[in-house]
Each structure stands twice: as structure tokens, then as C-alpha cells.
Image (cartoon, rainbow, N blue to C red):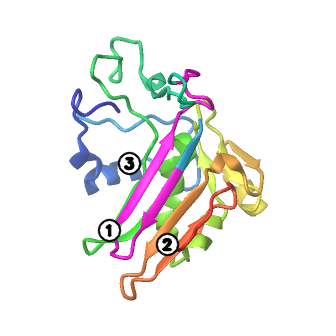
Amino acid sequence: MTDPAFSPTPVDRLLSPRYAEERARLIQMTRAAARYEPGTITGDTVFIGTVDAEGNGVSMLQSVYFDFGSGIVAGDTGVLLQNRGSFFSLDPTHVNRLEPRKRTFHTLIPAMLLKDDRLFLVYGTMGGEGQPQTQSALVTRLVDFGFGVQEAIEAPRWLYGRTWGTTSRDLLLEARIPETVAEELRRRGHPVRVVGAWDDVMGHAAAILIDPVTGVRQGGADPRGDGLALGF
């Protein structure tokens, strides 16, 4: 992935049922793939979400990427400059190669979910490349399984593959996930590694849900971090 102004992303194909079916056929429920390839197509972060009395919402992520960003402070402001340019490649043949005026691919994905063209959910998380997995878990728990906001955030999570710059392809499971599940995943060939019960690597999620009938706001914050949900 890269700046769409330099190399257009085929969003219609990626979101098409046909492409989803192609990817789904590669999954065997009884055995993990020995290796996988991406589909073929022709740190330190904080999330802030807010909704006002009129139903207007803001979903925002701020990050300097590495723990101290670029390590450069802007004059005497005390503001650390980020180093998201680290995502660029210096390989001239790479799709995300460094070029003038080009915006690099990065992991910041503050999100909103609409229902009947009205704001339904403001949500996001820190957590590097693991953000899409955490966000997908939150949405399916809320929409498909009827969890409450705080319940969806607190439920045990998993993380598959690289995140926060590591090259690991392990399947990380929080220790609250039953051992029988971990053992079955190992039997199917997954590289399972159990981490803490409330592990920081899973990200710090937060969300605000607006009830489409009553308009009541439901907020939740992640006990894995130091955030909070607050009405005022």
C-alpha cells in the first residue's frame, strides 16, 4: 500500500464479494497454512473519540511512531517530531518507495461506523499494525453478537503477525482465552504464543456508541491502558 496519488488502490476489487470468496477459499478450518502470501491486486499512539449533543463525532489518532518519534524536538516547543517516514522503502522498485511529495502508508486508522447514514460508532485503538484486528473484533462483537461497548473492549483478544515493528508471525492469545482453544489452534498448525491476561500488545481501544433509537451514548475504555470514557 502507498499514496493513492502515486499508485491507485483498487478499492472496488478489494471490497468485492468475488475477491472475498477468493481469499476465503484459501482458508482450511482444520489446518493452518504453512505459509501465506498477500492477496494479488491488478510507537506511541493515543486515540481520542468524542460525540456532542447534536450527534457530531470526531475520531482521532495521534502518534509519533517510535517511542520518541524522530528524536528531534521542534525548537524550544518541547514537541517531538514524528518519524512515520520510516515506513517508506529505499528500494526504487518498491511500491512505497521514497519520492518527493509522497505520503507514506502508516497504521493510523481512526474509525467511524454509520447506520442508515447516521453516526453509530466512533472507535479506535493504538497498537501498530494490530489496529485492524482489534477494530474488526470490536465491530463484530457489537454488531453481530450484541455486546455492550465496555464488554466488547474488555473481552479477550488475539493478535496475528507483525505489530509495533516486530517481525514475528506468532498468533498471540491473551491468557484469558481457554487453554483448550490454544491447544486446538496449535494442533491445527498455528504458531500460538500465550501472553498476559490484559496485555498491552493488544492495543488500547476506546469507543462511543450512539443508540439509533434513543440517542443515548455508550462509552467504553480499555483496561489494558490508562484511558477513560467520560460524559460531561
**Of residues 159 and 70, which is closer to you in this image?**
70
Q: Amino acid at mark 3?
A: Arg
Q: Residue at x 33, y 30 (%)?
A: 2
Q: Which residue is mark 2?
A: 142
Q: Which residue is mark 3?
A: 23
Residue 124 visible within the image: no
Closer to the camera: disc 2 or disc 3?
A: 2
What residue is shown at x 68% (from left), y 55% (from top)? 226
Q: Amino acid at mark 2?
A: Leu
Q: Is residue 232 above or below residue 164?
A: below
Q: In this view of the protein, can residue 156 be seen by the observer?
A: yes
Q: For the residue carrying disc 3, how many other residues have a C-alpha within 10 Å: few (<14), some (14-19), or many (20+)?
A: few
Q: Is residue 188 left or right of residue 194?
A: left
Task: Measure the C-alpha gap from mark 1 to mark 3.
Answer: 26 Å
50 magenta-colored: yes
User: Crowding near pointer 2: few (<14 within 10 Å), some, many (20+)?
Assistant: some
Q: Which residues are magenta?
A: 47-73
* Disc 3 secondary structure class: helix
Residue 153 among magenta residues = no
Q: Position of residue 126 (x, y in %)?
A: 56, 48
Lower sequence index among marks 2 and 3: 3
Residue 144 position in % (x across, y down) = 46, 74
Seen in the picture, residue 229 relative to 86 is either above or below; the reply is: below
Mark 1, mark 3: which one is toward the viewer?
1
Mark 2 and mark 3: Cα distance apart in space? 25 Å
Residue underneath mark 1: 114
Q: Amino acid at mark 1?
A: Leu
Q: Nearer the viewer, residue 221 or 1?
A: 221
Which label sits on residue 216?
A: none
